[in-house]
Image (cartoon, rainbow, N blue to C red):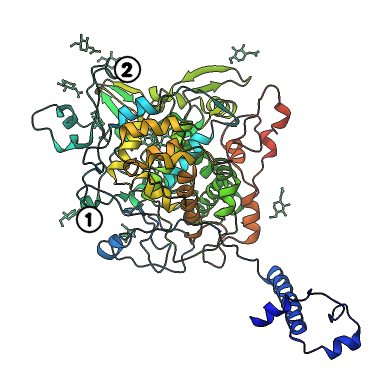
Amino acid sequence: MGNILRSRDKPLLNENSPLIGSEAKSKLKWFNLRNVLLFITLLLCILIILYGVFLIIFNKPTKTPTSRLISVATINNDYFDKCSPPVTCDPKAKYRTVNGSCNNLLNPNWGAALTPFYRYMDPVFSDGISVFRVQSDGSPLPNARTLTLTMFQDTLKICDHQNNELLVPWGQFITHDVAFSPVRSVNSSFPAALDHCEDKNPPIECEAVIRLSPDDPVYGKKNLTILKFMRLITAPAYNCTLVPATVLNTNTHYIDSSNVYGSDSDVANELRLFSGGQLLYNTIGKQEYCPQDPTKVVKKGNQTQVTIAFLAGDVNVNQNLGIALFQNLFLRFHNYLANKLQAEHPSWTDETIYQETRRIVAAVTQIITYDSFLPIILGEKYINEYGLNDETNYDPTLIASMAQEMTSGAFRLLHNIIPAQFNYMSENYTTYEVEEPSKSFLRPDTLIGNVDGFIRGLTETPGREPQPSYNNLISNIVIELPTINTTGFDLLSYDIQRGRDVGLPPYTKIRSLCGLPQAKSFDDLSDYIPSEKINQLKQFYSTVDDIDYYVGILLEDKVTGSMFGPTGSCVIADSFYRFRNGDRFFYDVKDQPGSFTSDQIQSLKKITLSHIICATSEIERIQKDTFRLIDHIRLMKLKPKCETYTINLSAW
Ligand code: HEM
Ligand SMILES: *[C@@H]1O[C@H](CO)[C@@H](O)[C@H](O)[C@H]1NC(C)=O
Ligand SMILES: *[C@@H]1O[C@H](CO)[C@@H](O)[C@H](O)[C@H]1NC(C)=O
Ligand SMILES: *[C@@H]1O[C@H](CO)[C@@H](O)[C@H](O)[C@H]1NC(C)=O
Ligand SMILES: *[C@@H]1O[C@H](CO)[C@@H](O)[C@H](O)[C@H]1NC(C)=O
Ligand SMILES: *[C@@H]1O[C@H](CO)[C@@H](O)[C@H](O)[C@H]1NC(C)=O
Ligand SMILES: *[C@@H]1O[C@H](CO)[C@@H](O)[C@H](O)[C@H]1NC(C)=O
Ligand SMILES: *[C@@H]1O[C@H](CO)[C@@H](O)[C@H](O)[C@H]1NC(C)=O
Ligand SMILES: *[C@@H]1O[C@H](CO)[C@@H](O)[C@H](O)[C@H]1NC(C)=O
């Protein structure tokens, strides 16, 4: 220490320095401490350079992310300690199990279907078990529909001219790969019990319904008094008593295409043809579609009445036209690849072709998500800070499970880019039909015969600019089906209410966890929330610490390059860090029985969503950056012909 201080007395490099001074003089002063220091520094530099060269030659340096969201929850092990079933794993298995077990060999149940969502923070319930959080002054949280109507009105109507509408179905497709929280499908959300919420002793199903005011601008006119919101199923339904209330994910948590193949073996087998490695399909007008759900085929006398309803690995396949389109494209993509592998390897069994194809489909889904999708929604800053496009550094201590704060909070922010309409376009790129997403819930009928038209429309229509509102049609859904009395739902109100249902901690707590300065008063939020919105928050919440997480993140200004503010981005970025680095079967993990060869990885990295669209449809041209908006009529030259999007499986 003293030496270093003393050496400062004189300039570091003078004529006495062995580096530049005369030999004689430097020899005399050779043992001068300053010179020894210089020598050591030089030696260190050389060593560091040599080490660097060594790393480059023998071993790619493993980058570590500069940011991570560190969980402070105390309950993440409870399920695994108390309830998880015993499993035996084959550590040499080349393919993923159907339900995701045995991915992590030390904790074989991690990330499996029917295990809980991960928590960054412990849940907050007013009774510590399951009752909705209340405000600091003891009053209930503000009515979710009132918040939507006063704070989140769709007035801007701005289009995002850089990206097209394909971002929406892709975002939802990925969501359905990594999560399904049961009891929320539109059908099962409206059981008869919910017609009795105004009775003297309303049934338990009514506990979380959203009350409507008679002068509600949409539902008031329909004489609706409630939105039929129901709580999620919790662990006791699976014979596992956990406190506080814990929701189990019905799908596998990994990005493994479980939405295509299923998350349990009965479903997986039901979806297979068991010939040529193919998935079961339904041919309608010479085109392949997902198989028809047999429960939706009704016999009336001698007539068979078919309601179009697809079967796929995820039960929400029919929810809207966009997700139905992608489930069908991926069914076709699987069968396209399976045919190709069968042709190139006539000796392969059905099982080998099915599993190899499944492995490729999952890898391609990961590649599209990390290489094309995340850079658009999260932006460069978060991609770099969280190392999302670094080579995967498999970490067996990392749990890859979907987080509750993500699935019931941050990742839903993309609901704000759902378009108000879906356009169908003909070969000459004129719109021939317009579908409102809200009018085709659970009714994907118009997809039949219109797959190409729908792809053209999604590719050609600008997306909605992320903003603190949803489009009017998605926050004012009215459902009128012959089988169901008129009802409706407001997706934004549902998203706010869902956060309360699963006990998400309030906004300020997660904001601090994400590294923002602690907000002690409403006005401390002004770094990311506009002042007029802060004033509104003051009217609804008794203190700054009562604000719902979802309300806060929807209001935050976007971080440059990201579609979200900092408290949403950090949860999304860290989740995608864990999906990647906590997955032993991630496509570029090395030295595992399921690893791809480097030739195979090279071929996989070339496959984009445009390749998939060209392999599964009859469209003529598409841009290389599938999510970018490119005007077909004026800039057709920027859209290569489909023949040029070849998929090369010669490395298999
Ligand atoms: C037309 C497009 C879409 C519609 C109609 C839609 C509708 C819905 C509905 C009705 C729910 C259940 C709400 C509840 O009861 O809690 C939901 C959940 C969810 N949505 Fe969307 N969504 C769409 C697109 C997206 C997109 C683009 C994303 C994100 C990238 C997304 C992310 C989520 C997530 C994470 C959940 C919770 C999943 C779970 O835990 O089961 N959705 N969505
Ligand atoms: C996953 O599947 C395995 C094998 O079928 C089974 O033993 C295990 O119980 C399942 N895991 C969970 C969490 O249900
Ligand atoms: C969906 O709702 C209809 C009408 O209430 C009912 O007949 C049908 O059984 C329900 N389907 C499921 C899977 O719950
Ligand atoms: C709503 O209720 C009022 C008064 O009972 C009635 O006049 C009106 O027709 C109802 N509207 C609908 C859409 O049912
Ligand atoms: C829960 O336990 C009961 C009694 O042991 C059993 O009948 C039931 O099938 C179990 N349910 C599940 C989902 O495992
Ligand atoms: C079905 O039955 C009706 C009379 O019940 C008959 O008129 C009709 O021809 C039958 N259709 C077919 C396809 O058999
Ligand atoms: C474009 O296609 C539509 C429907 O296919 C057709 O009605 C229209 O005439 C076509 N327009 C041109 C300019 O070809
Ligand atoms: C519709 O509502 C009426 C009155 O509340 C009820 O009697 C009827 O059963 C309901 N119908 C359906 C299909 O739920
Ligand atoms: C396919 O890829 C292999 C390398 O994996 C290469 O040798 C071959 O030329 C490629 N074929 C075509 C048609 O591009």
Q: How many marks?
A: 2
**What secondary structure is found at the residue carrying circle 1?**
loop
Upstream in sequence: badge 1 or badge 2? 2
Q: Amino acid at mark 1?
A: Val
Dividing the picture into quadrants, the one containing residue 489 is top left
Kindly identify which residue carries mark 1.
Answer: 243
Q: Amino acid at mark 2?
A: Pro
Q: What percent of the width, then of the height, locates residue 559?
A: 54, 41
Residue at 12% over, 32% down:
202
161 vs 389: above or below: above
**What secondary structure is found at the residue carrying circle 2?**
loop
Farthest residue to the left: give it.
Answer: 200
Dividing the picture into quadrants, the one containing residue 488 is top left
For the question of whether residue 273 can be seen, the reply is: no
CA gap, disc 1 to disc 2? 40 Å
Quarter that holds the N terminus: bottom right
Residue at 62% over, 34% down:
628
19 vs 597: above or below: below
